[in-house]
Image: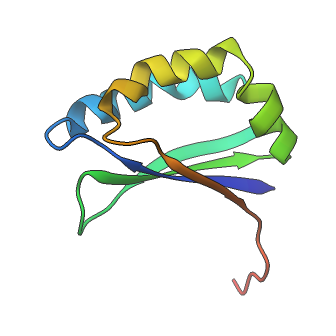
Amino acid sequence: MILEIAIIEVVPGKEAEFEKAFAEAGPLFQRAKGCRSMEIQRSIEFPSRYRLVVGWETIEDHMVGFRESEDFQAWRALVGPYFAQPPQVEHAKVAVKNF
């Protein structure tokens, strides 16, 4: 599995609205080919910073299948207004898993 990890800085004071929009966006990812999981994690030290973590079967499922879809446009329409700056996105895979 490939993990999409995005650092999202939200406009301060808009965190609750962002989280609500994120929850509404769940079905957009759930129906995407190859999408296996999706969550956001909120920073404790920096409460306007989130980490989006999405599990994909392949990078192509994310970068082509989802990013080029109408559902991606709907996702950005829901959550984009709360971004303080464009998200920083990278992909990762497990190199070593101990337990």
The C terminus lies in which quarter of the figure?
bottom right
In the image, 23 versus 50, the foreground residue is 50
Q: Position of residue 92 (x, y in %)?
A: 72, 63
In the image, 80 versus 15, the foreground residue is 80
Count of numbered marks:
0
Q: Position of residue 16 (x, y in %)?
A: 22, 35
Residue at 41% x, 48% y: name it.
Answer: 8
The relative height of residue 95 versus residue 84 in the rendered view (above or below) is: below
In the image, 90 versus 55, the foreground residue is 90
Q: Position of residue 57 (x, y in %)?
A: 84, 46
The relative height of residue 85 versus residue 88 in the rendered view (above or below) is: above
The relative height of residue 72 versus residue 54 in the rendered view (above or below) is: above
Residue extending furthest toward the bottom: 98
Residue at 77% x, 66% y: name it.
Answer: 93
The answer to whether residue 4 is seen in the rendering is: yes
Q: Position of residue 14 (x, y in %)?
A: 20, 35
Please indicate whether residue 40 sits to the left or right of residue 10 in the image.
right
Residue at 45% x, 48% y: name it.
Answer: 40
